[in-house]
Image (cartoon, grey):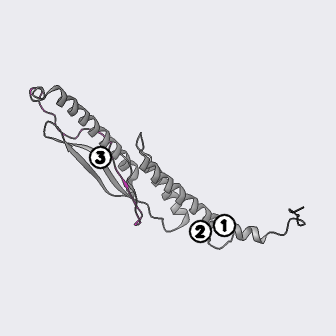
Amino acid sequence: MSISGINTSNTAYIPTSMSAGEGRGTRSTAANEELSAGDQRVLERLKQRDREVRAHEQAHVSVGGSLILSGPNYTYQTGPDKRPYAIGGEVTIDTSPARTAEETLVKADHIRRTALAPADPSPQDRQVAAKADSMASEARLEINAERNGEPDNRASPLQALFDRINDLPPAGGMIDTYA
């Protein structure tokens, strides 16, 4: 249902606790009647959660396309009917920068759309989307620097700003702040 994080190998794990379709057979009405009313409620909640998990995960996979490295991987809980139901899951996506700044900009948008694909993105999904936004900002800085004939300051955009300020001519006389 959520993205579990971005690790240092530039991949994001998108846990998917939501998904389309139950993907499992149902027991006969007679078999379901053997369960207590409490077990029936638990079973219905598990079935609903399973549908949500699979729908959530499928949204990531559908939008992710070439970004998908592995998954979906599900976490299961056994219901009172002794069947497994998905209660969580994840998909691993590639979040590494592309070869060029222009390609990275396109890829960052794809990562963002993949992370936010489910109808109800989790906090982890939103975190991966924010990282993609940051990647896109860095790519834009690099593209702008290349267009302006500036050296690549992607490692330190703040230093590039300070360098520009220091290169400006003085704006006027000194002001005595101790008067």
Label 2 Cα neighbours within 10 Å, binned few <14 / some 14-19 / many ≥20: some
User: In the figure, is residue 112 to the left or right of 86?
Assistant: right
Give the labeled residue for mark 2.
154
Q: Residue at x 22, y 29 (%)?
A: 41
User: In the figure, is residue 28 to the left or right of 127?
Assistant: left
User: In the figure, is residue 120 to the left or right of 101?
Assistant: left
Residue 19 visible in the displayed image: no
Residue situated in front as seen by the camera: 107 or 118: 118
Amino acid type, mark 2? Arg
Tag 1's secondary structure? helix
User: In the figure, is residue 26 to the left or right of 103?
Assistant: left
Give the labeled residue for mark 3.
88
Query: Please, which residue is most extreme toward the front here?
Result: 179
Where is the C terminus found, in terms of image quarters?
Answer: bottom right
Which label sits in the foreground, 1 or 2?
Answer: 2
Q: Earlier in the sequence, mark 2 or mark 3?
A: 3
Residue 147, label in figure: 1
Q: Earlier in the sequence, mark 1 or mark 3?
A: 3
Q: Do the residues labelled 1 and 2 touch (CB within 8 Å)?
A: no
Tag 2's secondary structure? loop
Q: Earlier in the sequence, mark 1 or mark 2?
A: 1
Q: Which residue is drawn at 42% across and 64% down?
A: 10
Which label sits in the foreground, 1 or 3?
Answer: 3
Above or below, 38 relative to 126: above
Where residue 33 sits: x, y (%)?
Answer: 11, 25
